[in-house]
Image (cartoon, grey):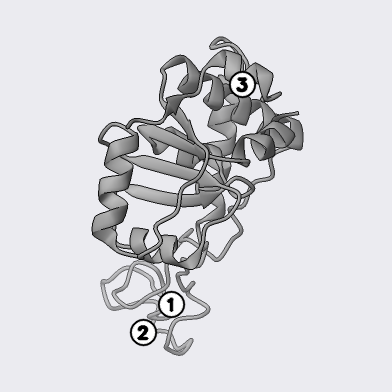
């Protein structure tokens, strides 16, 4: 039996704050950009002419050879020479204000409610820890696609059953982020997760 659809009326009753479709798009963009920037290691590194292997000896005399004037072989124009303006280790991380994070979460939740992509159930647990049981249970609750299952907590057997299912993801309501919601086709809210989201959007 499919899960109950989570409507705007349900959100209002649970004190989950949503915003209209004409607000918050820039907040969503800023937050997703920050998520992706914060995942960058920033470890790319090239050596300048002062760091590559070699000495400072002039490769041939200044005059009389008919060739261009050159200094040492570590110059950027030579094979094995230094790199000009190459990448150096840096920090790509971005900070997003708390009110922008809240606005982005309200906007995405509002979009999912309007598209009838959020469903709710009272409990969700896979007691036997089997992937086959997990798949059949989820398919009986929501339509096919990428499914995000949100609860305040999951037991070990449920995590075990879900770990090899690539189209489903278990996430706690406190750790849920906007990027995960954007990538999901369906969201399944379990029990008190709605109350946690109400606190996060307040």
Front position among marks 1 and 3: 3
Which residue was labeled with disc 2? Answer: 59
Determine whether 122 is above or below 132 in the image: above
Residue sitting nearer the eye, 95 or 83 = 95
Of marks 2 and 1, which one's residue comes earlier in the chain?
A: 2
Q: Which quadrant of the structure image shows residue 106?
A: top right
Residue sitting nearer the eye, 145 or 179 = 145
- Return the x and y of residue 100 as percentages of the image width and height: 69, 30
Q: Residue at x 49, y 32 (%)?
A: 120
Q: Which quadrant of the structure image shows residue 68?
A: bottom left
- Return the x and y of residue 123 as percentages of the image width and height: 50, 45
Which residue was labeled with disc 1? Answer: 71
> Does the rendering let one see residue 137?
yes
Spatial CA distance of label 1 from label 3 is 72 Å
As drawn, is 107 to the left or to the right of 79? Answer: right
Determine whether 151 is above or below 105 in the image: below
Residue sitting nearer the eye, 54 or 16 = 16
Q: Which quadrant of the structure image shows residue 25?
A: top right
As drawn, is 14 to the left or to the right of 70? Answer: right
Which residue was labeled with disc 3? Answer: 11
Spatial CA distance of label 2 from label 1 is 6 Å
Please, what secondary structure does the residue beneath circle 1 have? loop
Of marks 3 and 2, which one's residue comes earlier in the chain?
A: 3
Determine whether 98 is above or below 64 in the image: above
Determine whether 13 is above or below 190 in the image: above
Q: Residue at x 23, y 57 (%)?
A: 132
- Return the x and y of residue 128 as percentages of the image width and height: 35, 65
Of marks 1 and 3, which one's residue comes earlier in the chain?
A: 3
Spatial CA distance of label 3 from label 2 is 75 Å
Please, what secondary structure does the residue beneath circle 2 have? loop
Front position among marks 3 and 2: 3
């Amino acid at each position: 039996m499919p899960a109950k659809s989570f409507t705007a009326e349900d959100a209002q009753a649970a004190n989950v704050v949503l915003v209209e479709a004409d607000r918050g798009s820039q907040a969503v963009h800023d937050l997703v950009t920050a998520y992706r920037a914060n995942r960058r290691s920033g470890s790319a590194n090239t050596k300048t002419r002062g760091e590559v292997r070699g000495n400072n000896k002039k490769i041939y005399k200044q005059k009389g050879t008919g060739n261009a004037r050159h200094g040492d072989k570590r110059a950027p124009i030579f094979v094995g020479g230094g790199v000009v303006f190459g990448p150096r280790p840096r920090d790509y991380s971005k900070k997003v204000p708390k009110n922008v994070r809240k606005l982005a979460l309200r906007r995405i939740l509002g979009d999912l409610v309007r598209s009838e992509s959020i469903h709710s159930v009272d409990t969700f647990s896979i007691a036997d820890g089997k992937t086959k049981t997990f798949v059949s249970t989820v398919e009986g609750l929501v339509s096919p696609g990428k499914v995000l299952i949100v609860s305040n907590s999951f037991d070990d057997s449920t995590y075990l059953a879900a770990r090899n299912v690539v189209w489903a993801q278990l996430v706690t309501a406190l750790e849920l982020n906007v990027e995960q919601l954007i990538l999901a086709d369906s969201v399944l809210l379990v029990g008190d997760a709605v109350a946690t989201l109400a606190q996060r959007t307040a």
